[in-house]
Amino acid sequence: MLVVGAVFVDVKGFAQNHYLPLERNVGEVQVTSGGVCRNVAENFVKLGVKAQFVSMVDDNALGRDVREKLAALGVDAEHVIEAPKGMGMWLAILDEKGDLAGSISRQPDFSAMEAYLDRHGDEIMASAEGVVLEVDTNAAISRRVLSLAKQHGKPVYSIVGNMGVILQHPEYLHDVACFICNEMEAGRLFREDLTHLAPEAMLEALKRGSAVAGIKAMVITMGAQGAVYVDNQTGEFGYCPPMEVDVVDTTGAGDAFFSAAVAALMDGAPLSQAVQAGTKLAAQTLRVAGSCAE
C-alpha cells in the first residue's frame, strides 16, 4: 500500500487526576512521532501489509531519527524526504480517563513534497496496489495523487487530518473508494450536527449525506457507540457495535480502525467485515499508551 501524508511530532500530556483546564495538572508527558498517515503506515506493517510511505521529515537529527525508526519498523521509507519544516507538531492533552481534552496542531510546509511528487509521482504510483491519501496535506498534493491513481487504476482510501482541504474540495471524495471519518468530521462535511445521534439515526444521516455528496462508500466512527457504514455501490449498510475495553489512551484509535478496515477491503472483504476488523484493531489500540497497537 502506498501511504501519502504527513509526519507529526506528538506531544501528549496525561492528567493523573481530574483534569482542570485552567489549573496546573500533575501527570505524564510523552513525545513521540505520529501523524495519521505515519500511524497508518506503522499499523499496516504490524498487520502484515507492505507499506511504502511518501512523506517528509525535518532536515535535522530529529527528522532523521523519525525516518530511521520507520525503516526499522519495516516501513519502506525511500520516499520520505528531508525538508525545512517538513514535520508538523500535535500537542494533545488527555484527561484522567484517557479521553482527548484539547489539542493544537502546527502544519508542515508541503512545498517540498509537492515538488517531489511532480517529479516522481508517476513511477511511485505504478508500483502501488492501493493508495491511502491524507487529503488534508494540501489541495495540490491531493489533486496530483488522485489524478495519478485514476491514470493507473489504483483504489484510493482517504483519511482526514483537519478537514481543511476536503471542505474546500468535497468533489475529491468522488474519486475515493471508501471515506472513513468520525462523527464530528462527518458533521462538518454534511453541514449538520451529528455528535448526539444514536447509531440508528447516524446511519440514516450517513446514507442521506453520502448519497448527496457522491461518495461511493463511507464509514462514520462513533467512539464508544461503535460505527455505521454504507456502500452506495453495492447497497450494503449497517451498524457495528464497539468492543468493551479498559481505555488507556484514545489517540490513534481512529487511525488503527482505518488501517485494519482498509487492509480488509484491499483483501476483498465486504464493507461490513472491514468495519469489524477496524473495530477490533481500534480496541487493541485503546488499551495501550501510544498511537499504534502492539
Image: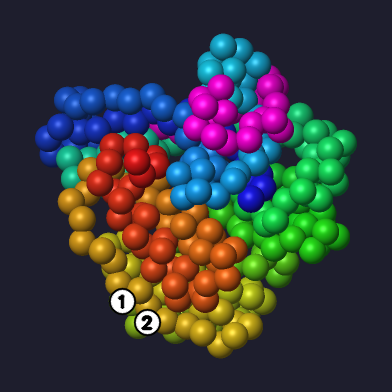
Residue 273: quadrant of the picture: bottom left
Q: Position of residue 267 (x, y in %)?
A: 56, 65
- Residue 169 in sight in this render: no
Callout 1–callout 2 Cβ contact below 8 Å: yes
Instruction: Name the residue tied to disc 1.
Output: 198
User: Is residue 191 found left or right of 52 in the rendered image?
Assistant: left
The magenta span reads: 68-91
Q: Quick one: 231 or 16, which is closer to the camera?
A: 231
Instruction: Name the residue tied to disc 2.
Output: 201
Q: Position of residue 185 (x, y in %)?
A: 49, 60
Q: Which residue is drawn at 87% across and 36% down?
A: 119
Q: Is mark 1 on a helix, strand or loop?
A: loop
Q: Which amino acid does label 2 sit on?
A: Ala
193 shown above or below 86: below
Q: Quick one: 190 or 135, which is closer to the camera?
A: 135
Q: What residue type is labelled 1?
A: Ala
Residue 27: quadrant of the picture: top left
Residue 245 within the magenta-colored segment of the rendering:
no
30 shown above or below 117: above
Q: Quick one: 40 or 85, which is closer to the camera?
A: 40
Residue at the extreme left of the image, as rendered: 17
User: Is residue 67 found left or right of 97 in the rendered image?
Assistant: right
Residue at the extreme front of the image, as rendered: 48
Q: What element carries label 2?
A: helix
